[in-house]
């Protein structure tokens, strides 16, 4: 497992993560285009981009440092998540469902080098409270547009945006890096960064996460 250095800080432009990578070729293209991180979707109840863990492991072996390899998981128990990380070799785990704090502690104990990113599906003010409650327990938050409370729950990759006013509140109070996801594309990304990070303190937003807006580009090139 490649150890990752969580770089960045004040003065940087937001890093870019390309998610839903499905082949070695796509990973290489994303890296050559300047991506700072790649996302790999493991088995999910629904949504785009899941691939077999054996393929994730194969691709990750080709990813050069310091590019981060994010494993997206919908698992909520420690043993399953830790086993996935061992099988894939990812150096970041992106947890798309809510989990008890003990899960974070178990992952840190079993795999100290692995960074933990918790997804917050931004729906309303309760999402702001949820983010504040865990900001000291994880290495980063990732704000997405899933619908965890819907009859058919979704976990991301929808191509939908969310209320950036809620995201702005989360970024302002967060005590860890924050990534922004959810329907970001060429015609709205500048506005999203300005609205979420604030025009006077843009470095509060650590990175942006792209999936649906670039799938056609990397899959057909």
Image (tube, helix red, strand yellow):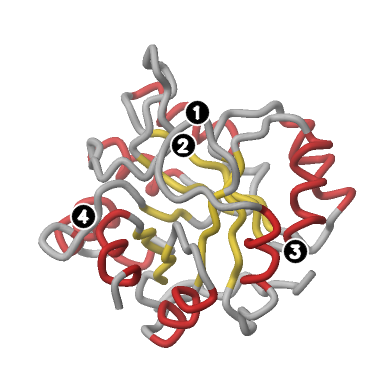
User: To which residue does mark 4 refer?
Assistant: 192
View extreme (bottom): residue: 32
Q: CA distance from mark 2 to mark 4?
A: 17 Å
Q: CA distance from mark 3 to mark 2?
A: 24 Å
Mark 4 vs mark 3, CA separation in Å: 32 Å
Report the residue marked by disc 3. Answer: 89
Question: Which residue in the structure is indicated by mark 1?
Answer: 130
Please state if 133 lies on the left or on the right of 195 as rendered. Answer: right
Q: Secondary structure at mark 4?
A: helix
Mark 3 to mark 1 CA distance (whole Å): 29 Å
Mark closer to the chain start, 3 or 1: 3
| Sequence-wise first label, 4 or 3 | 3
Q: Which residue is painted at 65% across and 29% down in the image?
A: 99
Q: Earlier in the sequence, mark 2 or mark 1?
A: 2
Residue in view at x 38 percent, y 59 percent? 209
Eye-nearest disc, 4 or 3: 3
Instruction: Determine the secondary structure under disc 1.
Output: helix
Disc 2, disc 1: CB below 8 Å?
yes
Q: Earlier in the sequence, mark 3 or mark 2?
A: 3
Disc 3 residue crowd, few under 14, some 14–19, many 20+, Cα 10 Å = many
Task: Give the image location of residue 75, x and y in percent.
Answer: 66, 34
Question: In front: mark 3 or mark 1?
Answer: 3
Quarter placement of the C terminus: bottom left
Mark 1 closeness class: few <14, some 14–19, many ≥20 residues within 10 Å: some
Gap in angstroms between the C-alphas marked 2 and 1: 8 Å
Task: Residue under label 2, please give it.
Answer: 120
């Amino acid at each position: 497992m490649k150890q990752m250095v969580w770089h960045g800080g004040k003065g940087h432009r937001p890093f870019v993560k390309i998610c839903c990578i499905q082949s070695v070729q796509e990973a290489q293209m994303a890296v050559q285009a300047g991506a700072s991180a790649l996302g790999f979707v493991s088995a999910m109840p629904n949504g785009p981009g899941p691939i077999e863990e054996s393929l994730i492991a194969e691709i990750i072996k080709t990813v050069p440092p310091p590019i981060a390899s994010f494993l997206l998981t919908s698992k909520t128990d420690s043993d399953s998540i830790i086993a996935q990380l061992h099988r894939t070799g990812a150096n970041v785990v992106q947890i798309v469902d809510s989990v008890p704090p003990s899960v974070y502690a178990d992952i840190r104990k079993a795999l100290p080098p692995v960074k933990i990113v918790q997804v917050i599906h931004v729906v309303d003010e309760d999402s702001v409270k949820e983010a504040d409650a865990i900001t000291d327990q994880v290495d980063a938050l990732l704000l997405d547009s899933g619908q965890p409370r819907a009859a058919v729950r979704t976990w991301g990759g929808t191509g939908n945006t969310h209320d950036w006013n809620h995201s702005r509140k989360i970024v302002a109070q967060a005590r860890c890096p924050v990534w922004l996801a959810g329907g970001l594309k060429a015609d709205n990304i500048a506005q999203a960064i300005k609205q979420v990070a604030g025009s006077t303190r843009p470095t509060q937003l650590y990175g942006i996460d792209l999936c649906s807006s670039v799938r056609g580009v990397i899959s057909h090139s």
